Amino acid sequence: MTAITIRFFAQFRELLGERIQLVVPEATTITEAVQIVCRERKEAADALFGEDGAFREYVILMQNGTRVNRTEAGSTVVADGDELAVFPPVAGG
């Protein structure tokens, strides 16, 4: 088993909470880990994932402070002690 932390920001934090400690099976991907958190929260799942089960194009992901392309999240495996961060689109000016 692998212990990870997932942190959600902005509107995702409102839907899922700020920090979630999670124990997942070995070889779990980033996509699978976040899907586990969203299983019983349809509104959050709809905000984060498209009908194909992949992250929506506006979701920003980081693994241990390094940005992960959302298209690679389905094949990027988490490791024990990893911290994932999930952000909505960033706007500013």
Image (cartoon, helix red, strand yellow):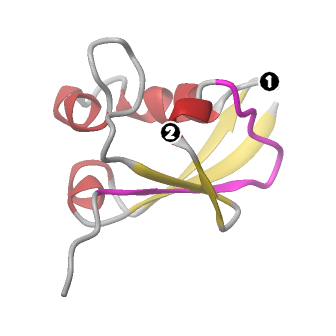
Q: Distance between the residues labelled 1 and 2?
A: 18 Å
Q: Residue furthest top?
A: 52
| Residue lying at 44% horizontally and 35% vertically, measured from the top left | 37
Please rate how many residues cluster around mark 1, counting C-alpha atoms within 10 Å: few if below 14, some from 14 to 19, many from 20: some
Residue carrying label 2:
70
Q: Residue furthest front?
A: 93
Residue carrying label 1:
27
Please tell me whether residue 20 belongs to the stretch shown in magenta.
Answer: no
Question: In the image, is residue 89 above or below residue 37?
Answer: below
In the image, taking residue 32 as reference, residue 12 lies left or right, namely: left
| Residue lying at 35% horizontally and 12% vertically, measured from the top left | 52
Q: Look at the image and give the residue range highlighted in magenta.
A: 75-88
Residue 26 placement (x, y as % from top left): 82, 26
Depth check: 53 or 13 in front? 53
Instruction: Determine whether the residue tagged by mark 1 lies in a helix, strand or loop.
Output: loop
Q: Quarter-wise, where is residue 24 in the image?
A: top right
Three-letter amino acid code at the position of disc 2: Arg
Does the CB distance between marks 1 and 2 fall below 8 Å?
A: no
Question: In the image, is residue 23 above or below residue 42?
Answer: below
